[in-house]
Image (cartoon, rainbow, N blue to C red):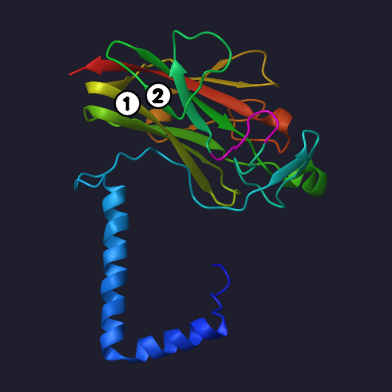
Amino acid sequence: MGEPIKLRAPARDLWEHVSQHPVWSGLLVLLLFAAGSAVVASLRGGDGNPAPLIAGWGPPRPVYWCRSPSSCDGADHVTFNSYANAPNFGDERAFVDAKPFADRGPGGFRDVLPVRSGEVVLIRFYVDNAAWAARLGRSDGLAKGTEARAEIPLTAGTQHDIMGFILARNARPRLVWDGVTLRSDEPTAVRFVFGSARWWTAHLPGEVRVSDALMEEGTPIGSWRLDGRFGDSFVDSGLLTFRVRVEAV
């Protein structure tokens, strides 16, 4: 919570006068209600219909910064995806994004992606343990029991929020999440492509197939193998990808 608001003397005197007068306090309530209603109306698009939202990250947690690409002061505990300006990714809190699978070039990943029926989309999770290796060492900064899980909506619609979750037994917070939004002009359904999940880190010889349990209870990931052990340096970070198919309904 932030510091309490401190009113200057004239404003404080006015507030004390208004709040103790029944007529003026009633008018103040009406004004606050009207202002709140206007804000709600603007968020709902002004016509009573909810404004479209997009999947976001959570939970709120301490954020860490890199003073330069080679100088990043992290956390004094295991915590995932908490650098605001990681040199190899940017804001790690927004760790789930997507692009058309047909786009084989570098980059192109987006947090909100327009899609159409018949299209295959590549979903990506970036995973990094922001524990500060220089402070904790490799042993105390090691995440244990690290798992990834994905959630795909089963219902048809024009907006699909695909969520990603990363957790570890000794992480604080234990669970972090983010999402990517797929939007179509016509109602569509999104289906997971079984057998498409892959995991990569710099310590692995190539992409490793990940269990389809990713879509259910979750599946172990790790820096060196799929055993839940996750290191505390950027070189230990990893990418998890899988494909979804957009289908007409």
- The amino acid type found where label 1 is placed reads Arg
- Residue 93 position within the rendered picture, expressed as x and y whole percent measured from the top left: 55, 40
Characterize the local packing of mark 2: few (<14), some (14-19) or many (20 or more) Cα atoms within 10 angstroms. Answer: some
Circle nearer the N terminus (1, 2): 2
In the rendered image, which quarter contains the N terminus?
bottom right
Residue at point 70% right, 44% down? 65
Report if the CB atoms under discs 1 and 2 are less than 8 Å apart.
Answer: yes
Residue identifier under label 2: 113
Q: Is residue 1 above or below residue 56?
A: below
Residue 49 or residue 188, whichever sits in front: 49
Secondary structure beneath dot 2 equals strand
Residue 224 or residue 23, whichever sits in front: 23
Is 112 part of what is drawn in magenta?
Answer: no
Q: Quadrant of residue 196?
A: top left
- The amino acid type found where label 2 is placed reads Leu
- Residue 124 position within the rendered picture, expressed as x and y whole percent measured from the top left: 50, 24
Helix, strand or loop: magenta stretch: loop
- Residue 96 position within the rendered picture, expressed as x and y whole percent measured from the top left: 49, 31
- Residue 24 position within the rendered picture, expressed as x and y whole percent measured from the top left: 30, 84
Q: Is residue 228 above or below residue 140?
A: above
Tell me the distance, in whole angstroms, between the alpha carbons under discs 1 and 2. 6 Å
Q: Which mark is residue 82?
A: none
In the rendered image, which quarter contains the C terminus?
top left
Is 91 part of what is drawn in magenta?
Answer: yes
Secondary structure beneath dot 1 equals strand
Span colored in magenta: 86-93
Q: Quadrant of residue 168?
A: top right
Residue identifier under label 1: 183
Residue 220 or residue 31, whichever sits in front: 31
